[in-house]
């Protein structure tokens, strides 16, 4: 199973257009459930991104579909990274 981190930012124009922004953000995140993917952890940040979502998928193309579907709604913008655990990474070089 592949692990992914999705960094999400609120689209600046969405902040101005939607008084119900928290509801719209939740609707955007529902795309994970609609694609049978569970978010393992969801964090709000004080850094470059507004949110970080950690999730796993047996099908790596699901990450592409979810990101595309979320971006299409225009509320959140995404950047998605496949990741492996540090110990697994260091074993590549032994």
Image (cartoon, rainbow, N blue to C red):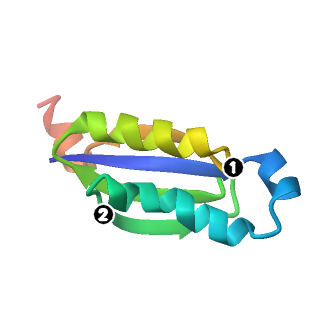
Task: Name the secondary structure under disc 2.
Answer: loop
Residue 85, given in percent of the width and then of the height, sits at 25, 49
Q: Residue at x 34, y 57 (%)?
A: 34
Label 1 and label 2: CA atoms lie apart by 24 Å
Q: Nearer the viewer, residue 1 or 14?
A: 14
Closest to the observer: 44 or 47?
A: 44
Tell me if residue 70 comes above or below residue 28 in the rendering: above
Numbered label attached to residue 24: none
Q: Position of residue 15 (x, y in %)?
A: 82, 57
Name the residue that disc number 1 marks. 48
* Residue 58 relative to residue 62: left or right: left
Residue marked by disc 2: 38
x and y percentages locating residue 26 in the rendered image: 56, 67
Which of discs 1 and 2 lies nearer the camera? The answer is: 2
Residue at 19% from the left image edge and 40% from the top image edge: 59
Q: Position of residue 75 (x, y in %)?
A: 67, 51
Q: Quadrant of residue 80?
A: top left
* Camera-side residue of 62 and 2: 62
From the viewer's perspective, tell me whether residue 5 is left or right of residue 92: right
Q: Residue furthest right?
A: 16
Q: Is residue 50 visible?
A: yes
Q: Is residue 77 shown to the viewer in this render? A: no
Instruction: Give the class, few, some or many, for how many residues have Cα within 10 Å of label 2's Cα (few <14, many ≥20).
Output: some
- Residue at the image point whose x is 48% and y is 36% from the top: 68
**Residue placed at 67% from the left, 44% from the top?**
74
Q: Element at badge 1?
A: loop
Disc 1: CA contacts within 10 A as few (<14), some (14-19) or many (>=20): few
- 77 w.r.t. 39: above or below: above
Quarter of the image where one finds residue 50: bottom right
């Amino acid at each position: 199973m592949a692990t992914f981190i999705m960094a999400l930012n609120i689209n600046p124009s969405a902040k101005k257009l939607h008084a119900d922004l928290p509801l719209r953000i939740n609707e955007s995140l529902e795309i994970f459930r609609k694609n049978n993917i569970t978010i393992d952890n969801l964090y709000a940040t004080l850094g470059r991104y507004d949110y970080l979502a950690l999730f796993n998928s047996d099908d790596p193309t699901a990450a592409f579909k979810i990101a595309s579907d979320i971006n299409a709604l225009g509320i959140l913008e995404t950047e998605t990274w496949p990741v492996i655990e540090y110990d697994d990474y260091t074993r590549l070089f032994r």
